[in-house]
Image (cartoon, grey):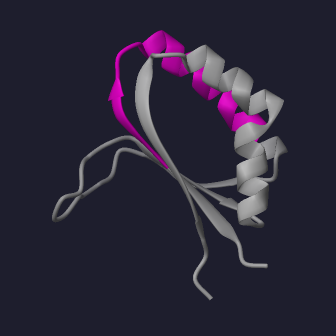
């Protein structure tokens, strides 16, 4: 079964306190679910239609593992802490063979 990658971008952040609460809960929740953080932060460069948005890249053993992490009670708690403090885009993709 191929690895999977969780890619999230923050389109906008409207509440830094809610974002901080989310980060405090989300990192441990995703690591506990088997995620490995590979990269996070604002891109150093963006090309074509790329945007300089806060981005996170997390590796999981499979798409199923990444989806289970998203739906886990611990991550859902992190999402409740974030509430409407940010607009995000989360994508899970399977690794290339």
State whether residue 39 is above or below residue 86: below
Q: Quadrant of the C terminus?
A: bottom right
Going 43% across and 15% down the picture, which residue do you hit? 16
Magenta stretch holds residue 29? yes
Going 40% across and 29% down the picture, which residue do you hit? 87
State whether residue 76 is above or below residue 45: above
Going 33% across and 52% down the picture, which residue do you hit? 43
Residue 30 % position (x, y):
73, 42
Residue 83 % position (x, y):
54, 16
Magenta stretch holds residue 68? no
Going 79% across and 29% down the picture, which residue do you hit? 74
68 relative to 86 in the view: left or right: right
Q: Residue furthest left?
A: 48
State whether residue 79 is above or below residue 1: above
State whether residue 57 is above or below residue 95: above
- Which region of the structure is painted magenta? 8-30
In terms of image quadrants, where is residue 71? top right
Residue 20 % position (x, y):
54, 19
In terms of image quadrants, where is residue 42? top left
Residue 82 % position (x, y):
55, 19
């Amino acid at each position: 079964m191929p690895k999977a990658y969780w890619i999230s971008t923050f389109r906008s952040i409207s509440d830094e306190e809610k974002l901080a609460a989310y980060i405090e809960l989300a990192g441990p929740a995703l690591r506990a679910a088997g995620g490995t953080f590979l990269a996070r932060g604002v891109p150093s460069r963006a090309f074509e239609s790329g945007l300089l948005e806060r981005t996170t890249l997390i590796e999981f053993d499979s798409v199923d593992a990444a989806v289970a992490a998203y739906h886990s009670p611990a991550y859902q708690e992190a999402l409740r802490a974030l509430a409407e403090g940010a607009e995000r885009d989360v994508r899970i993709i399977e690794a290339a063979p």
